[in-house]
Image: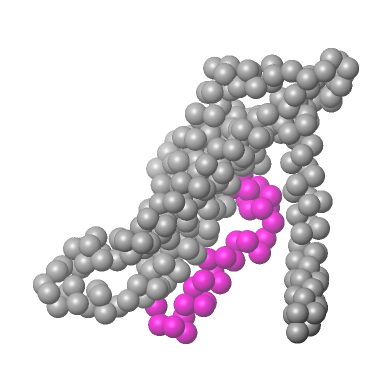
Amino acid sequence: MARRGSAGTARLARARLTLIGPGLSYLTALLLLPLALLIGYTVFQRGRFGGIDYDDGATGDNFARLADPLYAGVLADSLRLAAITTVLALLLGYPTAYAIARLPRRWRTVALVLVVLPFWTSFLIRTYAWIVLLSSQGVVNKALTGAGLIDRPLELLYTEPAVVLGLLHSYLPLMVLPLYSAIERVDTGLTEASADLGARPARTFLSVTLPLTVPGVLTGCVFVFVPSLGNFVVPELLGGGRTVLVGNLIRDQFLTARDWPFGSVLALALMAFLVLLLMAQAWAGHRLGGR
């Protein structure tokens, strides 16, 4: 019986390894190995013509450069724009998710498909579409000029509001979906009981619905904040290079300055910050869920 038990355990282990093997190989090849290379690059210096200089040995100067006020300003701008995008996404996404959750069941799927419909097109195409809309000869300025509301075109493109608008359009569905999931799970009996006890709709929302959906709010905020912080395509195209975020800085270190060691330090610092953010979100969600 002991031999049969050990043989069954071995078969179970082989079956599990067969199932997780492809995914584990994928993560090892495309996540763990590149991450190990980044960590290794951080302790070297930039070569004379770029890349890595292995001859001078290990150094910690790359980490000391993170304290430069220039890079601190870039990080502050990135955090500010990502936070603005997240707040706007929450203000727009919560009413949208609430309205979808209150639709008849047969219409909810249609509404959710419309929410994720932008993901069916290329990210670059959607970003270039905003250039067509916001340029000085674009649709928005022509419409305002034709209506007599303005005398000359407004500078809508290559500004921080244009960057926020592009990020908001790109990641708003990532806010709506977790919010919808959280709102849809709220027991309607609780809201009905609150109304029966004399609470107005606003009081019911603030006292019952909103506290029960806070985990969905936290998840949606993380889903929007994290990609907004590291995005470099939208600031480049809609900001015209005037708005430099952390993603642009990291890309420039690898492709323009060819300073791979410092680019690796910036990438690891950003990943460490995001991991701490995810851990804080998980902790807050666990505490709120326990309550």
Q: Is residue 168 left or right of residue 236?
A: left
Nearest the camera: 269 or 122? 269
Which residue is painted at 36% across and 57% down in the image?
288
Which residue is painted at 55% across and 37% down in the image?
273
Nearest the camera: 266 or 131? 266
Residue 6 versus residue 268 in the image, above or below: below
Q: Is residue 29 left or right of residue 210?
A: right
Which residue is painted at 32% across and 76% down in the image?
187
Residue 103 versus residue 159 in the image, above or below: below
The magenta span reads 103-131
Rendered location of residue 234, percent (x, y): 61, 42
Which residue is painted at 44% across and 51% down in the image?
283
Rendered location of residue 23, percent (x, y): 76, 62
The image quadrant where one finds the C terminus is: bottom left
Quadrant assignment, res 210? bottom left
Q: Is residue 118 magenta?
A: yes
Chief secondary structure of the magenta portion = helix
Residue 88 appears in the picture as rendered: no
